[in-house]
Amino acid sequence: MARSNFLRNIFSTLLLLISGIVFVSAQQKTNCKSQNFPIKKLGKVSPMKIQDDFEPKVFNLEMPAPGSDKHKLRLLKKKSAKLYPRTSAAHTTWEADEESALTIENGFPLATYLYIPALNDTIVTYLVGGIPNDNTVSISNDGFMLASYNSSIFAYDTEADTLLFKTSLHAFTSEFTLSDKYDPKTLYDPIADRFILVFLNGRLSADMRILVCFSSSNNPSDPWNIYEVPGNPLNDTTWTDYPAIGITKSELFITGNLLRDNETWQTGFSQSIIWQADLSNGYNGDTTLATQLWTDISYDGQNIRNIQPVQGGSVPLDTTMYFLSNRNFTILSDSIFLMKLDGSLNYLASSLSVNLGLTDTPYGAPPLGRQEIGEDSLSTNDARILGAFIEDNEIQYVANTINPSTGYAGVYHGFIENINESPLFTGMILSDDTLDFGYPNIAYTGSKNCSRQSVIAFNHTSPWNWAGVSAIMYNSDSKYSKRLTLKEGNSSIDRLNGPERWGDYFGIQRKYDTPDIVWTTGYYSKNNGNNYTWASKLRTSSDNPLMASITDSTDLSGFGKTDASATLIIDGGNEPYSIIWSDENIQTSEVANDLAAGLYVVTVTDDKNCVITDSVTFVETAPANNVFPNPTNENVNVFFELEQTAIVYIDLYDSKGALVKNMYSDQAKSGENLFTFSISPLAIGSYVLKINTDNEEILSQKIVKF
């Protein structure tokens, strides 16, 4: 046993050291293909006209058979548990910032309400979730919420506190197809003010379809335009599984995994694909939806698996879309695949690149989430990336992971900085001392320049806490808030003969016109052993991005002096800071000294490359005496002012009024002027300096040489 623990610790240490040293992207080794696919419109659906909804569903209740993909994943997790067993000394991996506050403004179950006038009572019907639940949510600027789960759609007016409609995915498209419908994904387009809903139809290559739905207005109750994208686009024996979606300003991207018919997940995986579609076609209800399909997406000869779109955090990007993937089916890995798709549908030079990055913190397939029923744990699947956004040249993403130091299921919070230069890959494992975490998602909540604030929401469980929902806020200064419980369950989940389905994903979206508001939908249990969906409206506290300002300055002590100073105060952001003043000495501290008259700009850059500037101007005031120094035996400074530009005549006389020297005759500009000359050629004594224009005497001043 001692030898086994020793070897395990050596292996972990070496892996951490290696990944901690090499955390930049490797050279591109990629190959992919693209082809255009014009997609015909199926028709239009009006949710408010749907009447009969039988909500047909089929669930498989069996334990995973030996040799199946699920069984192999269980074996992998058993190996992981031997290497990284749960420890009684588990601890929370982040130190909560007391000043970071995440609060709940509203929370409610997805349910229908029927008022009975005769009883003056309302019957509440809680909507039982699917197996798995597959939560997804979007919220419009007007407060319309569109939530979906396996296998229903729930539309709600959050401003009026009114249910708009609830219908199954089956009823939503039953006039076109009767196959099984599942894996919904929804998002809101803040530019077009429209909703998008994508879900799968069928489970074999012969009848597999991806149904892509666009709202015709900003109200999800209005008609939707429905398109049928091939689920077997290569016309072979593969079908699409596990969709993910994201948008740019003009295009929709759908990713999915192609699996071969009647094969396990491990042996049946063929490749992951990306669909690129024109948003305006869908919103307008055009008869054809222009699309492009990207296939054979690989790195170093190996197909990339489980591709997660990376959408703009505050607003969708212009024409560039990023994607992420990792080695999800592994005990521990530090590999992150960063993909970049440049160019729109009509751009002939569009390209898709794949880069491999090595993160400083390895991730791995998580253990099962524990319940009080020993064997009936909650399934955590693998370590695939489940959510991401990009803002200010930085990507933040989340995934399931094991915490190898405690053996608990946690959240992997990853970062990729300097996307367009030399990407830097880092990560943080968020793990609790009691709870197992699962199926996180992330939303950007920043509202200020260089803000990095985000909210991470996820499911939680433990032998002492039934399945519920939690959230954490991440601030620009790299600090996390306390974990906020959004909903606690009140029983164990007990629906399957084996591990219960706990995911497969979580719903989250920022309210684009109110950046400090986030809506989430997660998984919780009720006392009948079923799983349900809980919606929450969250508000973040004021962010703490990098701020810098010159708060104090000392003016010049006199004309011609270089003794001014300025003091800089820095707050927020991420230390260490780089400070550069624009003076001739390029000073680099908070206080700049020995400054002359003029404008000075200070530039502050924090450790996350956020840049902010401030400036100060020192004005040279008129001297108390026009001639200085006086008396002197060296140089003389003569200050004078002109109302307008003119020719000036500067002459020097002795004490008896005799001309000693015509010193200067030329144009001088309006305003303040300074004339200097040396009196070293003069004998000791008194002199008079006069400055005249053609129209007036400007100055007559006695000068003494000693």
Image (tube, grey):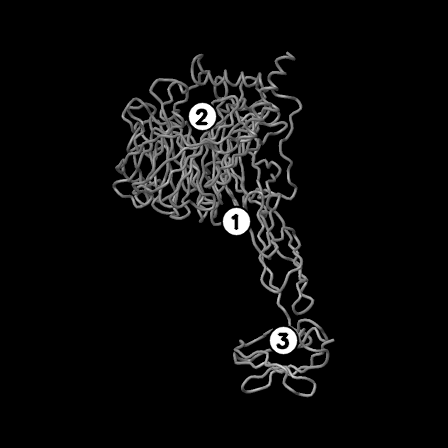
N-terminal-most mark, 3 or 2: 2
Q: Residues within 10 Å of mark 2 (few under 14, many from 20)?
A: many
Mark in the foreground, 1 or 3? 3
Q: Which mark is residue 163?
A: none
Mark in the foreground, 3 or 2? 3
Q: Secondary structure at mark 1?
A: loop
Q: Position of residue 27 (x, y in %)?
A: 44, 32
| Residue that lies at the very extreme toward the right in this rendered image | 706
Q: Visible in this render: residue 54? A: no
N-terminal-most mark, 2 or 1: 2
Q: Which mark is residue 639?
A: 3
Instruction: Establish if 699 lies above or below 375.
Output: below
Amino acid of disc 2: Ile
Give the position of the N terminus as an image quadrant.
top right
Contact flag, marks 3 and 2 (Cβ < 8 Å): no
Q: Which mark is residue 131?
A: 2
Q: Visible in this render: residue 687? A: yes
Amino acid of disc 1: Ser
The residue at which mark 1 appears reads as 447
Please name whichever residue, 259 or 695, is drawn nearer the observer in this view of the structure: 695
Marks 1/3: CA–CA distance: 51 Å
N-terminal-most mark, 1 or 3: 1
Marks 2/1: CA–CA distance: 37 Å
Mark in the foreground, 2 or 1? 1
Please name whichever residue, 339 or 167, is drawn nearer the observer in this view of the structure: 339
Marks 3/2: CA–CA distance: 87 Å
